[in-house]
Image: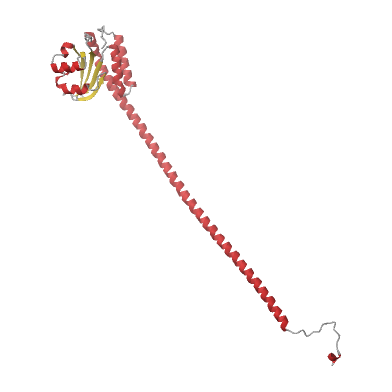
C-alpha cells in the first residue's frame, strides 16, 4: 500500500466543501451509489485505503453492511471473531467519540491481531453513533493498510468525529429522498397501470363490439346468400313453369288443329263449285 503522510489540521473550507458534497449526494444519488460515492469523497479530505460502514444492534447483529475496497470475505471473517472485536468494544462504550487504533492497539489480543493481519490493516479509526429511535447503531471504520501505513493524527480523528453526524444525517436524508422518489414512481406506475387497464378495457370493448358486428355481418351475408338462393330457385321454378305452360299450349294448339282437320273431313260439301254447269240429270 502507498504510505500516507500525516494530514495537517483541516480548515473550515475543506470541511465545508465536504459537507456541501455530502448533502448534494443525499439529494442527487440513488441509495445504491450513495455510500460508495461518500467514501470516495471522504478519502479525498481524509486519506484512507479501505473502510467499513454499516448499522448493527448493540449485540453486533448486522442490519446493514457496506465494505469499501475490502475483500468479499471480510464481513464473514469478522462475524467469526465479532466477540473479540476490540474496536467495537471501545466505541460502544463511548458513542459519538472517534477512537484511534494504531498497530499496537490492533494487536492487543491474538485473535483480533490475526484478523487485522489477514487483511493487512495497520491503522484504523472508528466512530459509532447511537440511534435510540431505531435502537440501532451506525458505525464507520477507516483503515490504512500495508507495512508503511501512517497512523491517523489527532487532527484527522477530530475531523472524522466532526464529519460523522453529518454523514449519518446525509445518509438518512438520502433514504428519505429515495423513499419519496420511490413512492412518487410507484404512484406514477400505478397511475400508468390504471391508464393501461382503462385502455385495455376500451380495446376489449371495441374488440367485443367488432366481433358482434362481424357476427351480424356474417349473419346478414348468410341471409343474403339464402335469399339469393331462394330467389334463384323461384326464378328457375317460374321459368320451368312457363316452359311447361308453353309446351302445353303448343300441344293444345296442335290438338285443336288435328281435331278441326278431322271435323272437316267428316262433313260433306253440299255446295257444288260455282263455275260448274248443271247437267240434264241434275235438272231432272
Relative image position of residue 149 (x, y in whole percent): 23, 10
Residue 163, placed above or below residue 272: above
Relative image position of residue 63 (x, y in whole percent): 22, 25
Q: Nearer the viewer, residue 203 or 76?
A: 76
Relative image position of residue 209 (x, y in whole percent): 45, 47
Residue 53, placed above or below residue 154: below
- State the residue at coordinates (70%, 81%): 263
Q: Is residue 221 visible?
A: yes
Q: Nearer the viewer, residue 26 or 266?
A: 266
Residue 268 lies left or right of residue 192; in this view the side is right
- Of the 4 image quadrants, the one containing the C terminus is bottom right
Residue 255, placed above or below residue 111: below
| Quadrant in which residue 274 is drawn | bottom right
- Of the 4 image quadrants, the one containing the N terminus is top left
Residue 267 lies left or right of residue 47; in this view the side is right
Relative image position of residue 276 (x, y in whole percent): 85, 84
Q: Nearer the viewer, residue 63 or 251?
A: 251
**Residue situated furthest bottom in the rendering:** 284
- State the residue at coordinates (56%, 60%): 232
- State the residue at coordinates (38%, 39%): 197
- State the residue at coordinates (39%, 37%): 196
Amino acid at each position: 500500500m502507498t504510505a500516507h503522510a500525516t494530514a495537517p489540521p483541516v480548515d473550515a473550507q475543506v470541511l465545508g466543501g465536504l459537507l456541501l458534497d455530502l448533502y448534494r449526494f443525499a439529494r442527487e444519488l440513488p441509495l445504491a451509489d450513495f455510500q460508495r460515492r461518500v467514501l470516495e469523497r471522504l478519502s479525498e479530505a481524509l486519506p484512507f485505503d479501505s473502510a467499513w460502514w454499516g448499522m448493527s444492534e448493540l449485540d453486533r447483529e448486522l442490519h446493514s453492511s457496506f465494505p469499501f475496497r475490502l475483500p468479499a470475505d471480510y464481513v464473514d471473517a469478522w462475524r467469526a471473531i465479532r466477540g473479540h472485536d476490540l474496536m467495537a468494544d471501545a466505541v460502544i462504550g463511548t458513542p459519538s467519540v472517534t477512537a484511534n487504533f494504531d498497530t499496537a492497539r490492533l494487536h492487543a489480543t491474538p485473535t483480533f491481531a490475526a484478523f487485522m493481519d489477514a487483511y493487512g490493516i495497520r491503522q484504523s479509526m472508528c466512530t459509532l453513533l447511537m440511534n435510540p429511535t431505531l435502537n440501532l447503531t451506525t458505525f464507520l471504520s477507516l483503515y490504512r493498510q500495508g507495512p508503511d501505513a501512517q497512523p491517523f493524527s489527532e487532527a484527522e480523528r477530530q475531523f472524522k468525529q466532526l464529519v460523522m453526524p453529518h454523514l449519518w444525517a446525509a445518509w438518512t436524508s438520502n433514504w428519505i429522498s429515495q423513499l419519496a422518489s420511490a413512492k412518487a414512481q410507484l404512484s406514477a406506475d400505478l397511475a400508468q397501470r390504471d391508464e393501461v387497464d382503462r385502455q385495455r378495457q376500451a380495446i376489449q370493448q371495441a374488440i367485443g363490439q367488432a366481433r358482434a358486428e362481424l357476427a351480424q355481418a356474417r349473419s346478414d351475408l348468410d341471409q343474403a346468400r339464402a335469399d339469393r338462393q331462394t330467389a334463384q330457385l323461384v326464378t328457375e321454378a317460374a321459368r320451368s313453369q312457363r316452359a311447361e305452360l308453353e309446351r302445353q299450349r303448343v300441344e293444345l294448339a296442335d290438338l285443336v288443329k288435328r281435331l278441326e282437320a278431322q271435323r272437316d273431313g267428316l262433313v260433306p260439301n253440299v255446295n257444288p263449285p260455282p263455275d260448274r254447269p248443271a247437267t240434264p240429270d241434275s235438272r231432272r
